Image (cartoon, rainbow, N blue to C red):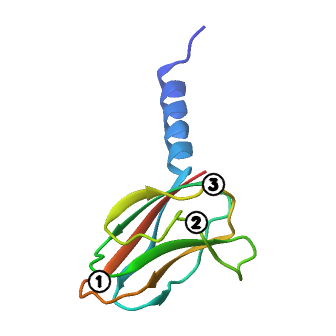
Amino acid sequence: MGLNAYEKNALLELYSQLAENRTKEITLLDGVTANGAGTAVNVLGYSQFQAQVAGITTATVKVEGSVDGTNYADISSNGKTSNEIFNLISGLYKNIRGSVTNYAGSSPITLKVIARK
């Protein structure tokens, strides 16, 4: 005995909502033109991360993670000195944030992350 049309639609809607809740888009740096760390964002419950940095002319950009919310370490496997898409070190973090060093460019830097549960 199969599902009726109503049940199929309900299951499809539920599946769509579950898939939507598994990912989160996060902006860590938005138009940054100076050295320093950005605001930390809570990512508890997420363990996979893909990042994209844009606007680098002369700068180093890192994504930093923290388990305790106080001490941060680079989870981008090396600071990025050019525009690119890259994977972050998978793990369970309380917070992540973007960080800029060696800024000497003229373009604003943007750093976005897609987090997945």
Name the residue: 58% across, 65% down.
75
The answer to whether the residue labelled 3 contacts the one labelled 2, judged by CB atoms less than 8 Å apart, is: no
- Residue 80: image quadrant is bottom left
According to the picture, the residue beneath numbered tag 3 turns out to be 47
Name the residue: 25% across, 83% down.
107
Which quarter of the rendered picture does the N terminus lie within?
Answer: top right
Nearer the observer, disc 1 or disc 2?
Answer: 2
Q: Position of residue 77 (x, y in %)?
A: 53, 62
Quick check: 42 left or right of 81?
right
Mark 3 crowdedness (10 Å alpha carbons): few <14, some 14-19, many ≥20: some
Quick check: 91 left or right of 82?
right
The amino acid pointed to by label 1 is Pro
Name the residue: 37% across, 58% down.
85
* Label whose residue precedes the other's in the sequence (1 or 2): 2
Q: Position of residue 21 (x, y in %)?
A: 55, 51
Q: Secondary structure beneath disc 2?
A: loop
Whole-angstrom CA distance, mark 1 to mark 2, is 22 Å
> Which label sits on residue 50?
none
Whole-angstrom CA distance, mark 3 to mark 2, is 12 Å
Q: Which residue occupies the foreground of this view, 57 or 2? A: 57
* Label whose residue precedes the other's in the sequence (3 or 1): 3
Mark 1 crowdedness (10 Å alpha carbons): few <14, some 14-19, many ≥20: some
Quick check: 4 left or right of 94?
left
Say if 6 sits above or below 112 in the image. Answer: above
> Which label sits on residue 75?
2
Q: Residue furthest left?
A: 106
> Which label sits on residue 108?
1
Q: Which residue occupies the foreground of this view, 116 or 20? A: 116
Say if 17 sits above or below 110 in the image. Answer: above
Say if 23 sits above or below 80 in the image. Answer: above
